[in-house]
Amino acid sequence: MTGGRVATEAGILCLSATGEGEGGADVVTTTDDGLVGQRMSWDDYWELPEELHAEYVDGAAYVSPGPGYTHQKISIRLLDLLRAQLPGAEVIVAAGWTGVVPRTWLRIPDVAVLARPPDGELITEAPVIAIEVLSSNRSDDRVRKYAEYFDAGAQQYWIVDPRDREVEVFSRGAGGWDSLARLTEEAPESTVATSLGDVTLALAAILG
């Protein structure tokens, strides 16, 4: 896909000579309760503007609204916490992770903990920890990514919920995710074992 882009009430309009929207364009839209996928090839996906923060699943690009202030503050706190407690790990914010089947799947975890730096620009080895901070697309993180991240080989999946002030930690089991820890206002601290070392979590340190 080539060309420019403009913002519309429907979403982001990605201009294309062969698209299907108005005037030969592809439209990637978002809704209040989820994401609308625009079908395109893997090669066309890479022509999308980087600032769209688009993910690619089953031959379609999915665009979520840009992260807000609170979301980013939490991501930075997690980054600092994990780098301090796992000094040998590679901890990164919002980097693309492509799954076990190439050219069909790419997600962008809010935070990822890796055993080693990736060979290129994309994460290709499953993270030790993949973390999502819930925002507008809550069901995507709790349902689709919950299954996808397990299938793609992540060792742990953390879900951080600023609205309900909870942090859930799941660890890879034989046939699915096992609940490893759940931080709430009533139980605000826990120490979690990972393959790279233990991590002590405090709800207030993560959510503020």
Image: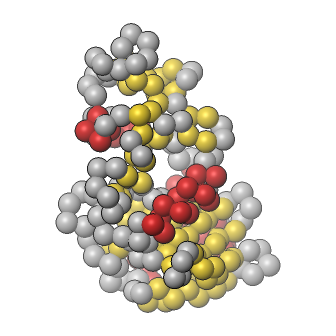
| Left-right relation of 171 to 23 | right
Instruction: Quarter of the image for the N terminus: give it.
Output: top left
- Could you say where residue 24 lies in the image, as x and y percent from the top left? 36, 14
Residue 75 seen in the figure:
no
> Which residue is drawn at the image coordinates 55% and 55% (left, top)?
144
Q: How is the image coloured?
A: secondary structure
Q: Quadrant of residue 208?
A: bottom right
> Which residue is drawn at the image coordinates 34% and 50% (left, top)?
104
Q: Nearer the viewer, residue 140 or 4?
A: 140
- Could you say where residue 78 lies in the image, as x and y percent from the top left? 51, 69
> Which residue is drawn at the image coordinates 28% and 17% (left, top)?
17
Q: Residue furthest right?
A: 186
| Left-right relation of 1 to 144 | left
Q: Is residue 182 above or below residue 76?
A: below
Q: Is residue 149 above or below residue 39?
A: below
- Could you say where residue 172 lies in the image, as x and y percent from the top left? 51, 79
- Could you say where residue 125 lies in the image, as x and y percent from the top left? 31, 69
Q: Residue furthest left?
A: 119
Q: Residue furthest top?
A: 23
Residue 168 seen in the figure:
yes
